Image (cartoon, rainbow, N blue to C red):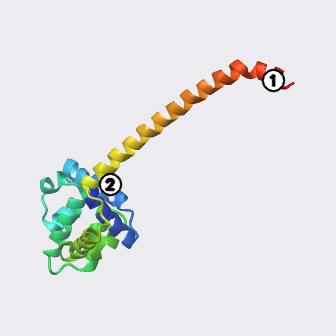
Amino acid sequence: VSHEAMQVWGAAGKATGVEIANVFKDVQEKIGEFAATGGGEAADVFKKLKLDVNDLIALSPDQQLLKIADAMSKITDMSMGEKSFLLESLADDSTRLLPLLENNAAKLRELDEIMRNSGSIITDDQNAALQEAYSNMTLLQAASEGATNALSMVGAEILNAFADDAVSAIS
């Protein structure tokens, strides 16, 4: 999942009360299980939506969910109960994402557009620059601590050299 996509999905999860990282983990695990065994909890998803596991297995979890949402939107007579059952077979609480995933994820795409237009998404380039700045701040902090230690040692040596004489002179 790209850094940018994770921000949108994170906002979607926050808006719906879903821990999106857990949903992504569960979706990948269930699809992986189906790919390996041909069974498991995701079997109904692949059967009902006529999806090919090979089309999903190489995708990131966010793209897997979008592909599943797209397949659900193409079945016009699917009830909300059926959609909920299919999503829940992939990940607990994923039904809460259903309003965002309906109509080929129209609401999720709208949220993405709002976040991009408002500047609330940190782009991959911006994230790289922030990571570089963090690394540089860490280096500067280490260098500053090193200089402080060196100056402290010089001060300590001077103090130690004259301490006895200073105490004698004061006394």
Q: Which quadrant would residue 46 be assigned to in this image?
A: bottom left
Kindly identify the amino acid type of the residue bearing the numbered disc 2.
Lys
Kindly identify the amino acid type of the residue bearing the numbered disc 1.
Val
Residue 128 visible somewhere in the drawing: yes
Location of the N terminus by quadrant is bottom left
Say which element carries label 2: helix
Residue at left 81%, top 23%?
A: 167
Residue 17, position as x, y percentages in the image: 40, 70
Label whose residue precedes the other's in the sequence (2 or 1)? 2
Residue 66, position as x, y percentages in the image: 20, 65
Q: Residues within 10 Å of mark 1 (few under 14, many from 20)?
A: few
Q: Which quadrant would residue 101 be assigned to in this image?
A: bottom left
Location of the C terminus by quadrant is top right
Residue 76, position as x, y percentages in the image: 14, 80
Of residues 24 and 81, the one drawn nearer to the viewer in this rendering:
24
Q: Which quadrant would residue 4 be assigned to in this image?
A: bottom left
Query: How far apart are the two marked residues, 2 and 1, measured between alpha carbons?
Result: 68 Å
Q: Which mark is residue 25?
A: 2
Q: What residue sits right under mark 1 in the picture?
A: 167
Say which element carries label 1: helix
Of residues 165 and 89, the one drawn nearer to the viewer in this rendering:
165
